[in-house]
Image: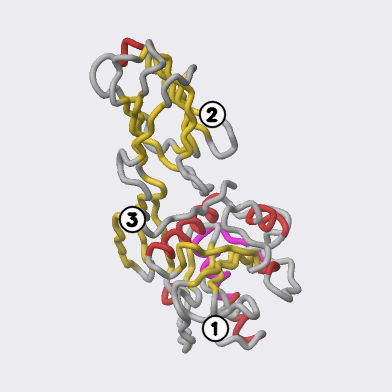
Amino acid sequence: MDDPLYNPSSSIWLLDFLHLITTGGEKRVEFKVNDCKPGGNPATFPATFYPRILTVDLSPNNAMEREIKSVRLSNSANIKDMVVQIIKRNGSIINPSYLPKSKLDGENPIAEFAPGITGKSLKINVLSEDHSIPLSFDIDIRVCLEGNLTIASRKSWSVKKTNLITISSPVNLVFIHHTDGSNCTTETECRQRVRNIQHGHMEERKFTDIGYSFLVGGDGRVYEGRGWGKEGAHTAGYNNISIAMAFIGDFSSYLPNEAAFTALRNLIAYGVSIDKISTSYKLSGHRDAANAATKCPGQSLYNVITKWHRYITNP
């Protein structure tokens, strides 16, 4: 599972649109986030550098891949051919775009890529007639992250009303949990699992409500627990300064499915976009909390989150 997290900068991180549709106790959140204006990455080949091979990091200090729309040369008069390669985070190279001389005639020749093609960096190789003449081009970086998220509100699965303590937002710390017990892959199963967890927390542990802020199901939905800006009962010593996102199930020996990972990624992105999670947030597993005597969020899941960009071992 690739790192679903990223490092948005408040100065360039732009929420294009946010649209909420509420139906049957669910909110479908559609969002698109840009972190670079179109054509906002001009670069120049140094003169006398031959062969002209340049690697451009699309997200410095950031593990997130970006979608590349195009690479446009400012002038093709001095060019014999050009090859543009997209390099993934794991170092693999995909979708090389070769532009021979026949395709470089005219002003502003462009290498375009199919929608959805993402990478961590670009490798551009240019063969020119006179390599003493500098070349310039623009990299058109588009969408860093876009997606949609279905949040099942409390009223869609619970009739219980509780008074919860409000905490300051945005929070700087996200804890990843698993609920233990059986997982779920359908809406019916997941809603019942959330009800059962709430019952156990309130009746057996004597919590005032379900302990988690949100729960993530294998059906790809996010189930609202205590929600944004409310004190939790999930990580002792951190409940009033953090938010908890719990995968439904026991992930000691296997991982959540892709739908669940995608939902978590989009939930964090959405939380940042509405200023409930800090743009400089950090992320830890439940077991990383001070004095936490637990194996949560399960060894298999824990092995994955420790590789994520925002992970810290000592929250």
16 left or right, relative to 298: left
Label drawn at residue 14: 3
Mark 2 in CB contact with mark 3 (< 8 angstroms): no
123 left or right, relative to 297: left
Label drawn at residue 93: 2
Looking at marks 1 and 2 on the same chain, the residue that comes earlier in the sequence is marked by 2
Front-lying residue, 239 or 82: 82
Residue drawn at (45%, 25%), measured in percent from left and top? 124
Name the amino acid type tagged 1: Asp
Q: Nearer the viewer, mark 3 or mark 1?
A: 3
Mark 1 in CB contact with mark 2 (< 8 angstroms): no
Residues under labels 1 and 2: Cα distance? Answer: 49 Å
Please provide the residue range marked out in magenta. Answer: 180-196
Q: Which colour scheme appears in the figure?
A: secondary structure
The stretch drawn in magenta includes residue 190:
yes
Q: Where's residue 90, x and y in %? A: 59, 37
Label drawn at residue 209: 1
Residues under labels 3 and 1: Cα distance? Answer: 35 Å
Q: Secondary structure at mark 1?
A: loop
Q: Where's residue 137, x and y in %? A: 34, 29
Q: Where's residue 136, x and y in %? A: 34, 28
